[in-house]
Amino acid sequence: MKSTKRTAYILLVIVITIAIDQISKVLVRTHIQPRTDLHPGERISIIGDAFIMMNVENTGAFLGMGSDLNPTLRIILLLILPILVLGFVLRHILKDKSIDNWSLFAFASIIGGGIANVYDRIVYGSVTDFFFIDLGGVFKTGIFNMADLSVTTGMFILLFVSFGKKKESDDIEKTV
């Protein structure tokens, strides 16, 4: 992939990821009554009790972790550190021309999701989460959003790609 096409691809994936996340959050904030200390909030069944939408403002990170931190530590761990990490990852994928397309997509999805959630923390002071999956105790998630889904999907893709590369290198070693 040519350098300008490659850069455009990376930026397009990041922008689309942010757009999907932000549009979904606007729709949720507009149409679903939020959960508060005084109100349980609205729960919308997508697929019975297995897949539910709700509106929860998360002041922490993944699954609310860090919401009890003092404000200075929260700014460092939930804003400054993620911005630095996202910037370094973006710089890395723009410079390293040996990264395959699946990994580029994965990294760009992670960056887009990270930027979308950091944006929420800066603008709203919290992140809007709204999806919840419960497959009868076999599999149950915390409440999450499209940015979280992008980050998680990107991580899974990177894992699969790295296992594929490991298998290739193991196969090469066996033939040598």
Image: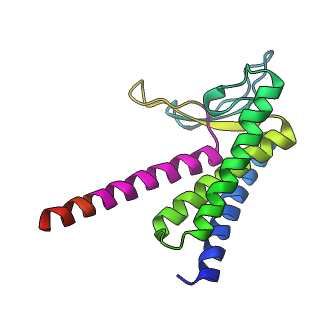
Instruction: Name the residue at the left extreme.
Output: 175
Most prominent secondary structure in the magenta stretch?
Answer: helix
Tell me the quadrant of the picture where the C terminus can be found. bottom left
Q: Is residue 9 above or below residue 74?
A: below
The spot of residue 9 in percent (x, y) is 61, 73
Quarter of the view holding residue 17: bottom right
Residue 143 in the image: state x and y as whole percent: 61, 32
Looking at the image, which residue is at 64% across and 26% down?
Answer: 65
Residue stretch in magenta: 143-166
Judge left or right: residue 137 versus residue 33: left
User: Can residue 32 be seen in this snapshot?
Assistant: no
Q: Is residue 104 above or below residue 81?
A: below
Locate residue 80 relative to residue 88 in the image: left or right.
right
Answer whether residue 109 is magenta in the image: no
Residue drawn at x 52%, y 53% is 154
Q: Residue at x 62, y 56 (%)?
A: 89
Please, which colouring scheme is shown? rainbow
Splitting the image into 4 quarters, where does residue 82 fall?
top right
- Furthest-right residue in this view: 123
Q: Point out residue 58 in the picture as x, y percentages from the top left corner.
A: 72, 30
